[in-house]
Structure formats: C-alpha cells, structure tokens
C-alpha cells in the first residue's frame, strides 16, 4: 500500500525553460558562455558543497550581466518564470484526504529551493521537502532515495516516486520505491488512480 508519494519539481510541477536558455534568449548571455559554470561549480552548488551566491560572484561579471547579484537571482528564481502547474494543488488535497503523505524530491540548490517553496506556498502542501542541495546527493544516486526513506520512516515499498526523467526513475526503482514516469498530467492522473 502506498503511504507517501514523492514528486519531482522541474518538468513536472514546474514548467520552465532551463535558465541557461532564458539567459541566452533574453540577455544575449549564450549557453556557451555559461556552460563552464553550469557543468562545473554549479554541480557542487546543487549538492550543497559550494554556495551559489559566492560562486556566481565570479561569473556574472564575465558574462557582462548589467545588474546586481540579487537581480540575477531574482531573474533566475522569478515566479513568473518558474510557473507552477496549479492542477497539482487539487491532486495534493485529494491525496491528503486519502491519508497519503506528500513529498518533494528535486535536484535543486538551496536558494532556488527556498524560492520555489516560498513562491508556491509549498510548505502548506508538502510533508517533507528533499532537495539535493540540502540532502547532499543528486538524483538518480541511490543515496538520495535512501535518505528520503530514512527521513520519512516508511519502507521503500510504501513510497512512490514520480519524475519526468527516466534515469531518476531507475534510481528510485533501484532503492525499492514504486515509480511513475511523468509524461503528461492526464496520463499521470490515469496511472495514479490505478495505483491507489
């Protein structure tokens, strides 16, 4: 029996382009310009080994960003850019009525996680928020899922994980969780009903 469901953020709950694409399209800061950062230091930020604000200070001047660091972060984390699929709020309410716990499982560093939680009022909906920047591991690493299992107090077979990324799904499956591949909201609803 499923007692808890873990939802992915980007590509499922949040619909937005990659920030590197946004910078390229709107500010002329190309994907090539930002590649070293996103493939390098940022990877340490999203598992909490480095602080995003400190690392960005070195890069935004190279990218010829015209504003401040806070303005850059606001552009990145803006709720107008990170649009929540509000259909999930009704899903969350229904799951709660069924007694099912709801969790977030995302690869995000701490500042963006804080912004997503604040701007979408997620503390009201989630029983636990597990972000790589706070957990110390990235999906699909099994340690990410083992951490969630330990913190929720459920056995793996009582948890279900939904993500749009097959590799992440396989990571969750290897940890013993039930899994669902998110392709569209309508398919998700059909599959969820079959599981519950």
Image: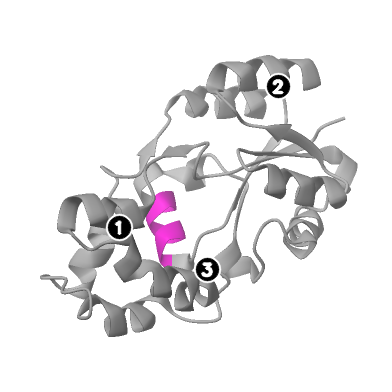
- Is tag 3's residue or tag 1's residue first in the polypeptide sequence? 3
Q: Residue at x 76, y 62 (%)?
A: 147
Q: Residue at x 22, y 80 (%)?
A: 62
Residue tagged by mark 3? 46
Q: How was this image coloured?
A: one colour
Residue tagged by mark 2? 192
Residue 107, above or below 159: below
Q: Position of residue 92 (x, y in %)?
A: 57, 29
Point out which mark residue 76 bears: 1
Q: Do callouts 2 and 3 mark residues in contact (Cβ within 8 Å)?
A: no
- The quarter of the rendered structure image containing the C terminus is top right
Residue bounds of the magenta highlight: 111-117
Q: Secondary structure at mark 1?
A: helix
- The quarter of the rendered structure image containing the N terminus is top right
Q: Residue at x 20, y 80 (%)?
A: 61
Q: Position of residue 56 (x, y in %)?
A: 32, 77
Q: From the viewer's side, name the closer residue of 188 and 28.
A: 28
Q: Position of residue 74 (x, y in %)?
A: 24, 60
């Amino acid at each position: 029996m499923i007692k808890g469901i873990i939802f992915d953020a980007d590509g499922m709950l949040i619909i937005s382009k990659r920030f590197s694409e946004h910078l390229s399209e709107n500010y002329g800061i190309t994907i090539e310009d930002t590649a070293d950062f996103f493939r390098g230091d940022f990877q340490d930020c999203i598992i909490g080994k480095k602080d995003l604000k400190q690392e960005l200070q070195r890069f935004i001047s190279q990218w010829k960003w015209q504003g401040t660091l806070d303005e850059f972060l606001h552009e990145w984390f803006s709720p107008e850019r990170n649009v929540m699929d509000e259909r999930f709020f009704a899903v969350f309410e229904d799951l709660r009525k069924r007694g099912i716990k709801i969790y977030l499982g995302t690869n995000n560093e701490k500042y963006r996680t804080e912004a997503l939680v604040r701007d979408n009022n997620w503390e009201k909906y989630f029983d636990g928020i597990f972000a790589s920047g706070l957990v110390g591991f990235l999906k699909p690493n099994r340690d990410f899922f083992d951490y969630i299992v330990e913190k929720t107090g459920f056995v793996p077979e009582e948890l279900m994980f939904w993500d749009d990324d097959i590799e992440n799904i396989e990571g969750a499956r290897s940890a013993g969780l039930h899994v669902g591949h998110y392709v569209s909201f309508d398919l998700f609803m059909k599959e969820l009903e079959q599981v519950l």
